[in-house]
Image (cartoon, rainbow, N blue to C red):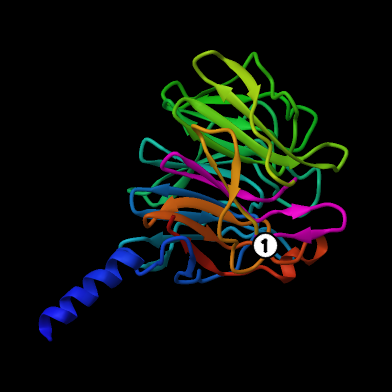
Amino acid sequence: MRLAGVIASFLLLSLTGAHGAAAGEWNDGVPMNNARAFSSAAVRGEDIYVAGGAGITAPQNSVEIYDMLGDIWRSGPALPEGVQQGAMASLGGLIYLSGGYLKESKGADNASLWVLDPSLGFWVSGPDMPTPRAWHGMAALGGKLYVVGGEGGSAASVLVYDPGAEEWSALSAPMPQPRSGLALVAHKGKLYAIGGRLSNGEITGRVDIFDVETGSWREGPALPAPRAGHAAAVFGENIHVVGGEQASPPQTHATHYVLDVTGKNWREEAPLPTPRHGLTLVPGRGGVVAIGGASGPGFYTVFTETDSVNRYRP
């Protein structure tokens, strides 16, 4: 009987994985302490940092840290000011947060760069970006930070931050189709700018790929449906894109699209448990982790924010 029990436990572990999540399904994780949408997230080691987010009267400045090994959330160093729709990335053991809205209105975007050294436990101000950005994407690649898209007249330019020199520069090759509310990921020397909202309000499924080595853009396989306010993360050789919104009629989605970067076609996998936009997605726990967001579009965002955490293991 004891042997049978051991065998049964082994088979269960094989089916569900080390963290109890069945392959190909979303499983609930420990919820955040605060509900938040349009926050920013980055992974450092076994910790997921989630900062800021929309608020009813003003953007949030709180930071939460998820310990993936301990399966627990703890409070992190608060941001110097509340921000939503900024962009965050981890590089060289530091956490960087760029731009975003300081107020819940257009025109309140800013050019700030905040830097957190977790060993010190507080944020410091870095060099401002050359132009304000909000609802943009930022990714670390080759020891530098790349800022792509966002709202504003200068959003076509691609900004590059060199942390060693503490200097910003702009690429000579602008983004082919400027847009905000996109998802940006980096993988093997390339940046993938996925979906987003055009300046005329139209939402697109376009994908643009920037090759750092050649310094050029090319158009990649478009999403199966237009999306903005969605989230993306790389796990293995696959790009996962979840959630998002459409413009007409205003609606949020639970869709989950996956692109094998060696191929040319997107495929659909298990949708999120609930539709939402303004969420974040990061790699971790043997797959990807979807955090926060809101089920209601537009005006309803701040009233439908969630503290949900969902894990997906391919």
Q: Residue furthest left?
A: 2
Q: Depth check: 186 or 87 in front?
A: 186
Amino acid tagged 1: Arg
Residue plotted at (69% across, 29% down)? 131
Q: Secondary structure at mark 1?
A: loop
Which part of the image, by quadrant, shows the N terminus?
bottom left
Q: Is residue 6 left or right of residue 289?
A: left
Q: Residue furthest bottom?
A: 1
Which part of the image, by quadrant, shows the C terminus?
bottom left
Q: Is residue 247 left or right of residue 284?
A: right
Q: Is residue 228 left or right of residue 60?
A: right
Q: Position of residue 265 (x, y in %)?
A: 60, 38
Q: Position of residue 272 (x, y in %)?
A: 59, 63
Task: Read off the magenta span.
Answer: 226-254
Give the answer, above or below, for where 171 lies relative to 231.
above
Residue 145 visible in the displayed image: yes
Q: Depth check: 277 or 257 in front?
A: 257
Give the answer, above or below, for where 25 lies relative to 221.
below
Residue plotted at (53% across, 59% down)? 290
Q: Quadrant of residue 250?
A: bottom right
Q: Depth check: 50 or 197 in front?
A: 197
Q: Quadrant of residue 149?
A: top right
Q: Quadrant of residue 294?
A: bottom right
Residue plotted at (59% across, 68% down)? 273
Circle 1 residue: 276
Residue 244 belongs to magenta span = yes
Q: Position of residue 54 (x, y in %)?
A: 68, 59
